[in-house]
Image: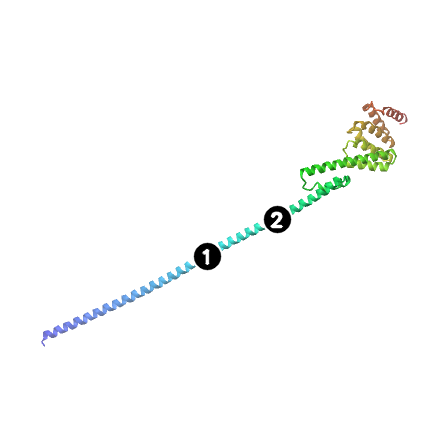
């Protein structure tokens, strides 16, 4: 083997060693790149895992929130429906109670109206008058109310007239206490009846008979000034003068008698009035 071959071999060995070193460096660089890529891949994977975990958590939270909202909405709807049902039930119960009360009231009204009609049929006047204030508060029909009012007015007129007639009978017999009681009853039953002015005049006479002229005078003043029955006015004026004489109100009595002569010159009592006036003027 010559020197040239040895140089070739050396050169090849050096080149081989250089190539080996380069290869080793490349392998090391590649290894480093692989490690770097692996680290980056691991970082990516961890980031993806974290992102997936966060996304999962957020998704679950959104689902839970949505479920809670939906559950609350459903619960509110059920509660509202339940409250509406309860309100409807309460309204129905109230309406039922109202209908029952109205029916009971109608039955009571019907029974009370029937009882009142029985009083009318039996002509029980006093019971009619006493019970009508209560009956009038009932929910009567227009016809019932009109019939009942007519019956009550008729009973008042009849009782007033009967009491007036009894009072006149007591006046004629001089039973003054019974007379004034009956005449007061007559006026209490019906103060605006056609016979009420005569009843008031008779009551004043009864009071005078009882020595209670001061009670009679206001009645007679009213009758003498504005009576519904003009035929009573002259009698009331004359009786007023007599009551004034009884209590020794001489000037009032003379003024009343003079007023009588001016107002009732055609009265049948004119002569009596002139005589009484002359007597008073002579003595007082």
Considering depth in this image, is 68 or 159 the residue closer to the camera?
Answer: 159
Q: Residue at x 69, y 43 (%)?
A: 110
Q: Is residue 87 above or below residue 247?
A: below
At which x and y percent is residue 163?
Answer: 81, 36
Considering depth in this image, is 139 or 77 the residue closer to the camera?
Answer: 139
Q: In the figure, is residue 113 to the left or right of 69?
A: right
Which residue in the protein does label 1 denote? 67
Does dot 1 land on a helix, a strand or a loop?
helix
Q: Residue at x 83, y 32 (%)?
A: 202
Q: Is residue 120 above or below residue 85?
A: above
State which quarter of the image contains the C terminus: top right
At which x and y percent is residue 117?
Answer: 72, 40
Q: In the figure, is residue 244 to the left or right of 14?
A: right
Q: Is residue 3 above or below residue 114?
A: below
Graded by Cα atoms within 10 Å as few (under 14), some (14 to 19) or many (20 or more), the crowding at tag 2 reads few
Residue 53: name its quadrant. Answer: bottom left
Graded by Cα atoms within 10 Å as few (under 14), some (14 to 19) or many (20 or more), the crowding at tag 1 reads few
Residue 31: name its quadrant. Answer: bottom left
Considering depth in this image, is 235 or 274 the residue closer to the camera?
Answer: 235
At which x and y percent is residue 52?
Answer: 38, 61
At which x and y percent is residue 151?
Answer: 73, 37
Alpha carbons under labels 1 and 2: distance apart: 42 Å
Q: Nearer the viewer, mark 1 or mark 2?
A: 2
Residue lying farthest to the top in this orientation: 266
Which residue in the protein does label 2 denote? 96
Q: Residue at x 40, y 60 (%)?
A: 56
Mark 1 or mark 2, earlier in chain: 1
Residue 14: name its quadrant. Answer: bottom left
């Amino acid at each position: 083997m010559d020197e040239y071959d040895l140089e070739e071999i050396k050169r090849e060995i050096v080149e081989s060693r250089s190539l080996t070193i380069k290869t080793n460096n490349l392998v090391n660089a590649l290894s480093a790149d692989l490690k770097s890529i692996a680290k980056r891949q691991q970082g990516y994977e961890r980031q993806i895992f974290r992102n997936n975990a966060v996304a999962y958590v957020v998704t679950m939270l959104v689902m839970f929130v949505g479920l809670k909202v939906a559950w609350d909405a459903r619960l509110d709807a059920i509660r509202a429906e339940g409250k509406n049902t309860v309100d409807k039930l309460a309204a129905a119960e109230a309406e039922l109670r109202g209908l029952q009360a109205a029916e009971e009231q109608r039955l009571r009204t019907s029974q009370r109206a029937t009882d009142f009609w029985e009083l009318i049929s039996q002509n029980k006047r006093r019971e009619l008058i006493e019970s009508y204030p209560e009956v009038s508060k009932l929910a009567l029909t227009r016809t019932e109310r009109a019939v009942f009012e007519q019956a009550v007015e008729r009973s008042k007129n009849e009782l007033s007239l009967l009491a007036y007639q009894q009072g006149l009978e007591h006046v004629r017999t001089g039973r003054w206490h019974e007379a004034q009681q009956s005449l007061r009853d007559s006026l209490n039953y019906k103060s605006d009846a056609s016979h009420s002015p005569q009843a008031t005049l008779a009551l004043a006479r009864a009071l005078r008979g009882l020595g209670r002229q001061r009670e009679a005078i206001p009645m007679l003043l009213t009758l003498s000034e504005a009576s519904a029955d003009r035929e009573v006015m002259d009698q009331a004026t004359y009786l007023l003068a007599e009551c004034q004489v009884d209590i020794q109100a001489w000037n009032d009595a003379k003024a009343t008698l003079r007023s009588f002569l001016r107002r009732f010159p055609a009265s049948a009592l004119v002569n009596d009035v002139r005589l009484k006036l002359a007597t008073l003027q002579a003595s007082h």
